[in-house]
Image (cartoon, rainbow, N blue to C red):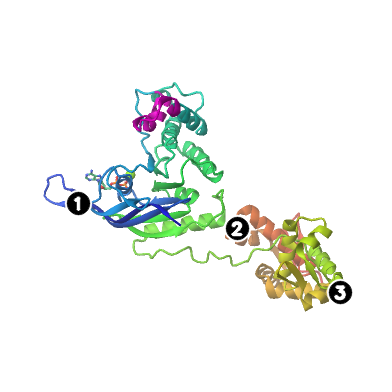
Amino acid sequence: MTSLLVAEHVTKSFLLPDGSDHYTVLENVSVNVRAGEVVALLGRSGCGKSTLLRILAGLIAPTEGRVLADDAPLTGPNPNVAMVFQSFALLPWLTVQENAELGLTARGVAKEESEAEAIKALRMVGLEGFENAYPRELSGGMRQRVGFARAFVMHPEVLMMDEPFSALDVLTAENLRGEISELWEAGRFPAKSILLVTHNIEEAVTLSDRVIVLAANPGRVRGELMVDLPRPRDTKSGRFKHLVDHIYTIMTNPEAVIKQVPGEEPRFPSLPHARAGGISGLLEMIVDHGGRDDLPQLAERLRLEVDDLLPIVDAAVMLGLAEVAHGDVMVTNIGAEFAQASQDRSKEIFREQLLRRVPIIQTIVEALRGKNNGKVKADLFLDILDEFYSSKEAQRQFATAVDWGRYAKLFEYDADEEILQLPED
Ligand SMILES: Nc1ncnc2c1ncn2[C@@H]1O[C@H](COP(=O)(O)OP(=O)(O)O)[C@@H](O)[C@H]1O
Ligand SMILES: [Mg+2]
C-alpha cells in the first residue's frame, strides 16, 4: 500500500535556553501513514508527539532526517495535511463560518466555493445554524467541532489530530469521538487517512487501525501494534480490554518488547451459528442427492440464500461430517453414516465428533464431569467466551454450544436457573 506521509530517521533537537547545548526531543524517528488507515501515535506527555506532528506538517524542519509527502521530500508547509489542535486554535474575532473557511481563504479559493464547503463541513459536525456565532458563544465541544470543520474543508490526504479530545470533558469527548468514528466507518470522512496523536490508550484502540508507541527522553518509536478489532469498536468486549491492558503493560514497562497481544487467537474457534437439527437435516438432503450437491442449487431447493446456508455447511465441516470443494458440498463417510443411522446411533456419532473437534464443548463437559453434582453455572463459560468475543457474540457462541451439546445428550441446560448439568443417567 502506498504511504501518503513518511518520516525517515527524523531527529529534532533544540538549543537549551542558555544556548550552551542541544536538547534532543526526537531521535531517529521513522513512521509512515498509508492510504486508508487510521494511525495513532501514542505516548506520554512530553515525549515529542506534537513536535513530530509539526515536522510532518512541514511547520518546523527536522534537525536530521526527512519527511516525504506523496513520495516527495518536504521543504515547506505540507499541502496534503490539515490539523485539528487540542486547544481548538480558533480566531475569536471571526465567526464560526469564517473560522471554518480560513484554510480555503488562505489558499485563495473563491469566496462562493469556500462558503459552500464550510457550510457542508459545519453540517457534518452538527453545527448547522451556528454559522454566525462567535467562538466565545460556544461550548468546548462545539468549538472543537469548528476545529474539525476547518480541517474538513481542506479535504486533506492526511487529517492530523493532536489530542483533539483531551481539552473536553469526558462525555463530550466520548460523543465527539463516536461521531468521528461513525464518519470514518461510513466512508464519509473527508480525508484518506487519519493520524491521531494521543496519550489515551483507549482512545488509540477505539479509533485506530495501528498504534505506534513512542518512548520519551528522547522521543523515539518503541514499536507498533495492529488493532485488528471489528468496527464499530466494542469497548466492552474482552478483546478490546485485553488489547488496552496489553498496551498499558508495554507503556509501564520500558524494557518490554512490543508484540501483538499474546494468545489473541481464540482458544475456542468460533462456532458457526447453526442448529444441530439443521445440520442433520442438511446432511440428509445431500445424502438423498447422492452424497454431493452444488451449493447454489442446494440453497435454491431449500429456498435459502447461500449466505444463510453457509453457517450450516460450515458447522457440518467443523464437525467432520461434510467437506466443501469447488462450490460443492460432499458428505464424508462419517457424515453419511450420521445421516442414515438410527436416531440413537446418529446422536452417538454427533457426540463423538463434538468431543473430538469442538474445544468449547470439551471444556464444558470436562467442567461438568469434574463436579460432584455434575452442575456448573452458565456464567463460568460466558466469562471465558467474553475474553475472546464481544458480549453479544459470547452469548451466541454459548447458545450454539448448548444447542449442540443438548442434541448430542452430552449435557442439559436449565435456561431459568442458567445452569448446565450432565444428563440424569
Ligand atoms: N520550540 C521548542 N523549543 C524548545 N523545546 C521545545 C520546543 N518545542 C517542544 N519542546 C520540548 O520538546 C519536548 C516535547 O514536546 P511536545 O512535542 O510538545 O511533546 P508532547 O506533544 O508529546 O507532549 C518538551 O520537553 C518540550 O518542552
Ligand atoms: Mg502535545
In the foreground, 34 or 373 = 34
Which quadrant holds residue 374?
bottom right
Task: Give the vertical position of 271 relative to 137 (above or below).
Answer: below
Q: Residue at x 65, y 70 (%)?
A: 359
Image position, residue 195 (x, y; %) = 41, 47
Q: Amino acid at mark 2?
A: Tyr
| Residue at the disc numbered 1 | 23
Residue closest to the eye, 389 or 157: 157
Give how far across and how far down residue 217 sits, in percent. 26, 55
Quarter of the rendering occupied by the C terminus? bottom right
**Residue type of the residue flagged with mark 1:** Tyr
In the drawing, does residue 103 fall left or right of residue 307? left
Disc 3 residue type (three-letter) = Gln
Residue under the image location 71 percent in, 65 percent down:
314
- Pointer 1 local density, CA inside 10 Å: few below 14, some 14–19, many at least 20: some
Q: Secondary structure at mark 2?
A: loop
List the residue tagged with mark 2: 389
Q: Is mark 1 within 8 Å of ligand 1?
A: yes
- Say whether disc 1 or disc 2 marks the residue closer to the N-terminus: 1
Q: CA distance from mark 1 to mark 2?
A: 46 Å
Q: Residue at x 60, y 58 (%)?
A: 389
